[in-house]
Image: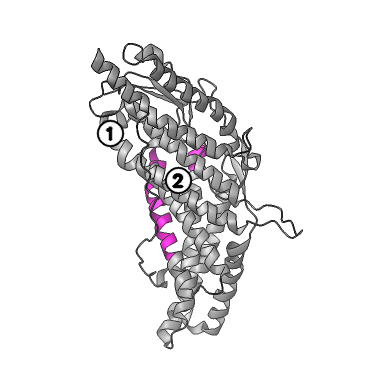
């Protein structure tokens, strides 16, 4: 079944949380960091020296690299390259994938080694400092979660405005937007794999002791967050494109609402029982803010399409939709402020591109339509009378992540066992 132990918050002094995380385009709830494990003590009677060395060396490299990278995950302006000139993000992801290829040997069918090793990880969103479990599937789940968080951290770095070479205001390049879409889909793939293939392998009696960071609700919320931010970028690109129709923009905005709504539904119940800590509450506020922002965009484009109708009813519904958009925009700004003042404090990126466009257009168009159709407008019933948004099927799916093949050393191990 595996056993579990938890250290109280700040008991070991290992969890370092910044008081300010600077500008945020993508909220990353920190990186859960692994602590050193002595594989030889637990597995020396079961595995060859080469396999033990392989497990130990890869995991130790991960521990060392994350000790340096974890603080930078919440301060993306400090993004670094490796000594060979490549991205540390790509190097750590590859290292984690290599580690999984060795680690999965402990959990393969018929293995008696699943509960031999105590794995220790420092938490971020949970109240307890660290969680120790003698369950190799817990280690697999933790690795997948870490891979997803690294992706969100990288996407955040890419979506922060950079100084323009032409001397104009900072902006996010089109290449960065397109690349971040791929990264978000990859993050969603790791999380989906964790939910579908790793979490079910952990017995329910053990699953109850998982940290908040690894609960199904948080994993699903993060997966929906990744997809929601993906659509957010697509909507921004559609707004900037003269070829994109109102119908396309409305569909994207409505899909974005559904992704963020699912994220909010998954994370809110947990906040009622588990989120006494500011870091996790900040995560919930980020999801709420983006959900309200998505609703503002969806009602705005829905209102513009309704206003193209020729009936009094369609104009009345258009006014209600545009006023609802304005109200949701105001609520999203309040949620953004609450998010930023919640510890660790943060700053929202400057209004650029599509966000700046909507923040300017929604109040202006809502006010204009209300004046034109004053007899149809009752400010006290804005949200009550707002028409329902169209229900579109969700188009985006996570990139499917497949576990890597077993490390060849496991095949040699099997041959050696047959010989003995």
Residue at the disc numbered 1: 201
Q: Residue furthest right?
A: 167
* Image side of residue 289 versus residue 403, left or right: right
Quarter of the image that includes the C terminus: top left
Please give the name of the residue rendered at 47% of the width and 46% of the height, measured from the top-left corner. 284
* Image side of residue 54 versus residue 171, left or right: left
Q: Which residues are magenta?
A: 254-282
Query: Is the stretch drawn in magenta largely helix, strand or loop?
Result: helix
On the image, the x and y values in percent for residue 366 come to: 54, 74
* Residue 255 counted in the magenta span: yes
Q: Residue furthest bottom?
A: 310
* Tag 2 secondary structure: helix
Residue at the disc numbered 2: 187
How far apart are labels 2 and 1 at the CA level?
21 Å
Q: Is residue 205 above or below residue 279?
A: above
On the image, the x and y values in percent for residue 397 come to: 38, 54
């Amino acid at each position: 079944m595996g056993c579990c132990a938890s250290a109280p918050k700040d008991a070991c002094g290992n969890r370092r949380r910044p008081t300010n995380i600077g500008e945020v385009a993508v909220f990353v709830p920190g990186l859960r960091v692994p602590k050193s494990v002595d594989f030889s003590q637990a597995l020396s009677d079961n595995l060859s020296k080469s396999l033990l060395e392989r497990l130990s060396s890869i995991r130790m490299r991960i521990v060392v690299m994350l000790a340096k990278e974890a603080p930078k995950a919440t301060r993306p302006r400090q993004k670094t390259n490796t000594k060979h000139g490549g991205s540390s993000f790509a190097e750590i992801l590859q290292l984690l994938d290599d580690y999984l290829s060795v680690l999965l040997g402990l959990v393969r069918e018929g293995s008696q080694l699943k509960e031999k090793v105590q794995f220790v990880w420092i938490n971020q969103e949970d109240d307890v400092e660290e969680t120790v479990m003698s369950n190799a599937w817990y280690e697999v789940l933790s690795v997948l979660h870490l891979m997803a968080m690294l992706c969100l951290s990288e996407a955040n770095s890419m979506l922060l405005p950079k100084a323009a070479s032409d001397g104009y205001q900072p902006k996010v390049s089109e290449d960065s937007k397109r690349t971040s879409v791929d990264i978000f889909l990859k993050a969603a793939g790791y999380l989906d794999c964790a939910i579908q293939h790793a979490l079910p392998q952990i017995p329910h009696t053990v699953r109850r002791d998982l940290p908040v960071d690894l609960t199904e609700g948080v994993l699903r919320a993060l997966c929906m967050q990744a997809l929601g931010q993906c659509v957010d970028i697509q909507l921004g690109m559609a707004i900037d494109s003269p070829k994109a129709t109102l119908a396309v923009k409305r569909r994207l905005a409505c899909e974005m609402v559904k992704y963020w709504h699912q994220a909010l539904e998954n994370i809110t119940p947990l906040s009622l029982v588990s989120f006494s800590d500011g870091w996790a509450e900040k995560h919930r506020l980020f999801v709420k803010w983006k959900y309200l922002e998505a609703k503002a965009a969806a009602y705005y484009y829905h209102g513009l399409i309704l206003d193209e109708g020729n009936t009094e009813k369609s104009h009345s519904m258009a006014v209600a939709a545009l006023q609802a958009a304005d109200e949701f925009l105001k609520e999203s700004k309040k949620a953004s402020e609450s998010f930023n003042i919640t510890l660790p404090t943060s700053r929202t990126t400057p209004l650029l591109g599509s966000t700046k466009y909507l923040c300017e257009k929604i109040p202006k168009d809502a006010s204009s339509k209300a004046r034109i159709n004053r007899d149809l407008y009752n400010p006290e019933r804005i949200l009550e009378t707002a028409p329902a948004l169209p229900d579109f099927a969700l188009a985006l799916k996570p990139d499917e992540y497949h576990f890597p093949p077993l490390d060849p050393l496991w095949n040699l191990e099997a041959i050696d066992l047959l010989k003995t």
